[in-house]
Image (cartoon, grey):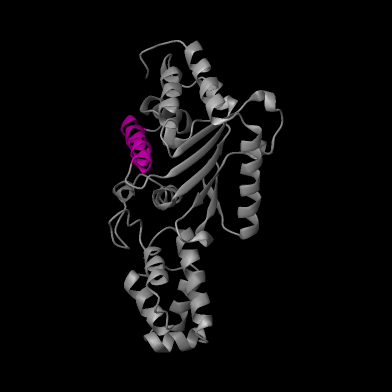
Amino acid sequence: MRYGPAVRRRKLGAELRRQRMRAGLTSGGAACLVGWHQSKISRIETGRSGVRPADVERLLDAYGVREAEPRALLAALCGDGPGEGGGAGRQGWWQAYRDLLPPEYRDFISLEYEASRARTLETTVVPGLLQTPDYARAVTRAALSGLPAEQVDELVDVRIARQKVLRGERPLELWAVLDEAVLRREVGPPGVMAAQLRHILDVGRLPHVRLQVLPFASGVHIGITGPFVIFSFPLIADLDVVVLDHLTSSLYLEQQADLRAYSDAFDTLRGHALSCEKSSEFIARIAAARPAGTGA
């Protein structure tokens, strides 16, 4: 059985392996201490198999890890998303949609839900955390043509539910760089884009949200290779991950070299983008030029 998204399983497995080696134990020796088969230790450490929080505690006891903070952090990597005030292993709200959502999307939502910060470049569409229902519906219909209307509505519900991370007790810190094409592209019936742009401005006023526009006048930039998201997590820097979206799947980059490359790329992009204040003025001008309408 899987516990938590694949990215976290791999991160957890690598850390458990590090703790085992620090204790001077072979995988076989660790298996003897906890009464498991050696193959189970191997599957956990390679991320091929999940592990329950109670089993993590058992391993940490065997490895002599007594400090409360690393024990709590490692246990928290087991679940599908404990959330604020929840215990490790508690099911996230998105599990109610598991028959609708592919595993990669559930993994993405789980990471987004637990992250403390997200840095994103968008070159084509408005980021999901900033979309209005009408905009999300139009994008979903275009991307998944032929999907029954009720499933489209459910996917839109998921998209809007994700946005709660910006409104919680400990809201996600969002820094988004938007290519001008995102703001110019007509999506949906008349009025949808005007409302969407106003919504972006509203969300941009939140103290933990920074929005910058990369205008066409900036010319060719490093972001032309495509959009990406960098998730960062409280207290566990090694859990940071880059997510690249493709038409049928998502690619997760976890190596330090990849993280540094994309972090540097984001810094370069925000340096070329308009300031947050000038970006708001830029978006407001485009919104004012959009035709009003009734939406979708």
Q: Is residue 147 visible?
A: yes
**Residue 42 x %, y %:** 49, 76
**Tally of numbered discs:** 0
Q: Nearer the viewer, residue 193 or 204?
A: 204
What secondary structure is the stretch in magenta mostly built from?
helix
Q: Nearer the viewer, residue 136 or 254?
A: 254
**Residue 87 x %, y %:** 29, 62
Rendered-image quadrant of the C terminus: top left
Rendered-image quadrant of the N terminus: bottom left
User: Residue drawn at (58%, 30%), measured in percent from left and top?
Assistant: 275
Task: Look at the image and give the residue range highlighted in magenta.
Answer: 148-167
* Magenta segment includes 156: yes
Q: Residue furthest right?
A: 220
**Residue 230 x %, y %:** 54, 48
- On screen, residue 51 versus residue 143, left or right, reads left
Above or below, 256 relative to 276: below
Quarter assignment of residue 267: top right
Quarter assignment of residue 63: bottom left
User: Residue drawn at (52%, 87%), measured in percent from left and top?
Assistant: 24
* Magenta segment includes 76: no
Above or below, 235 relative to 278: below
User: Residue drawn at (38%, 65%), measured in percent from left and top?
Assistant: 78
Q: Is residue 248 visible?
A: no
User: Residue drawn at (50%, 11%), measured in percent from left and top?
Assistant: 289
Above or below, 100 relative to 6: above
**Residue 194 x %, y %:** 44, 17
Q: Nearer the viewer, residue 139 or 239?
A: 239
